[in-house]
Image: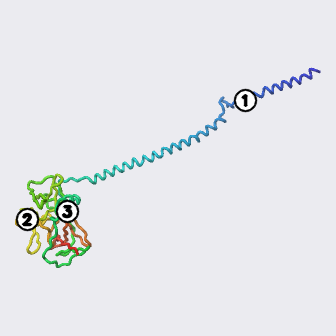
């Protein structure tokens, strides 16, 4: 009877001890990572930080792009702007390059160059139209408070400058040296050099062609001079836009006389519009296009303030 009663107590103690021993094993088992079939830890708990990594790197890329943007924008104006400035400077330099002053005498005269030449020249000695003692039979053309007086009717024809040959040069033309045939003419302390119908003043290490000074006297008329009629009793001699009159010393430069008709005007003259009419202006002298005996000519105009 005693043996029967003690067995249950032993079993109960054994069961109790077994339960006590099983508790740490289950707790450790729960704390240990679960492993797959290959023996490596399952990434269930550590994969979450890996998935968040791209979100942490995204701000870094954004900041980098933002920092680089100003550098890219600043470099663009520097390169392109510098290129444009360089091209503009080259273009300006090309436009202001001084043309060669030698060679062919058919050149376009610069107004600035002509003005520089006349700085030390008495402009009162240049051409001013003289009145003709013959009365006008035609009413003047009036425009802008001025009257343009002529003896012939207005007849427009296009202006074409006449070429007087290789020895003649227009105003403003520069030569480095003069021929040995050149002579010196002094008028009121202004020295001119004359050669074959052309007048020069010394300038810039050479000689520049200027308007013939009124009062200059030469012994022989230039080759190719023409006789032009001023009125019934007076003739002038005309060459390259310059008028001469016979004098005791030879032939003296005189202003053009109103009503004088010439066939050709030189290079340097240009058409100018006055109201409804087109004149040709050479220096300060106006010429009206006319037709005489079926030939295109130019008449010296007398301009009066009215």
Quadrant in the rendering for residue 103:
bottom left
Label 3 vs label 2, nearer the camera:
2
- Callout 3–callout 2 Cβ contact below 8 Å: no
- Estimate the x, y position of residue 260 in percent, counting from the top left: 14, 71
The outermost residue toward the right is 1
Q: Secondary structure at mark 2?
A: strand
Image quadrant where one finds the C terminus = bottom left
- Would you name the residue on which mark 2 appears? 251
The local crowd at label 2, few if under 14, some if 14 to 19, many if 20 or more residues have their Cα within 10 Å, is many
Question: From the viewer's perspective, is 82 left or right of 226?
Answer: right
Q: Which residue lies at the image location 15% right of the left edge and 57% below the top edge?
A: 201
The spot of residue 88 in percent (x, y) is 33, 52
Q: Nearer the viewer, mark 1 or mark 3?
A: 3
Q: Give the Cα distance between marks 1 and 2.
A: 138 Å
The answer to whether residue 108 is seen in the rendering is: no
Which residue is labeled 3 in the image? Answer: 268
Q: Which residue is mark 1?
A: 29
Judging from the image, what secondary structure is the residue with disc 3 in? loop
Mark closest to the chain's N terminus, 3 or 2: 2
In this rendering, the answer to whether 260 lies above or below 6 is below
Q: Earlier in the sequence, mark 1 or mark 2?
A: 1
């Amino acid at each position: 009877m005693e043996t029967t009663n003690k067995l249950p107590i032993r079993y109960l103690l054994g069961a109790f001890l077994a339960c006590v021993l099983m508790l740490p094993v289950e707790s450790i088992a729960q704390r240990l990572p679960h492993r797959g079939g290959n023996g490596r830890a399952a990434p269930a708990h550590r994969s979450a930080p890996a998935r968040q990594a791209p979100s942490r790197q995204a701000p870094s890329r954004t900041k980098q792009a933002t920092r680089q943007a100003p550098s890219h924008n600043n470099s663009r104006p520097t390169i392109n702007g510098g290129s444009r400035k360089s091209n503009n400077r080259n273009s300006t330099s090309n436009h202001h390059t001084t043309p060669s002053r030698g060679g062919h005498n058919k050149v376009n005269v610069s107004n600035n160059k002509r003005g520089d030449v006349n700085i030390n020249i008495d402009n009162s000695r240049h051409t001013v139209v003289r009145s003709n003692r013959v009365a006008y039979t035609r009413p003047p053309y009036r425009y802008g408070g001025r009257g343009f007086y002529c003896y012939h009717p207005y007849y427009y024809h296009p202006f074409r400058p006449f070429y007087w040959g290789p020895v003649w040069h227009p105003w403003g033309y520069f030569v480095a040296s003069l021929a040995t045939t050149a002579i010196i003419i002094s008028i009121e302390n202004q020295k001119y050099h004359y050669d074959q119908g052309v007048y020069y003043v010394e300038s810039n290490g050479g000689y520049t062609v200027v308007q013939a000074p009124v009062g200059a006297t030469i012994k022989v008329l230039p080759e190719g001079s023409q006789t032009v009629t001023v009125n019934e009793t007076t003739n002038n001699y005309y060459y390259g836009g310059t008028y001469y009159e016979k004098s005791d010393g030879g032939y003296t430069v005189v202003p053009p006389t109103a009503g004088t008709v010439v066939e050709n005007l030189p290079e340097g003259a240009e058409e100018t519009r006055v109201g409804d009419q087109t004149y040709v202006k050479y220096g300060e002298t106006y010429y009206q296009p006319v037709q005489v005996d079926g030939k295109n000519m130019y008449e010296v105009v007398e301009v009066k303030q009215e």
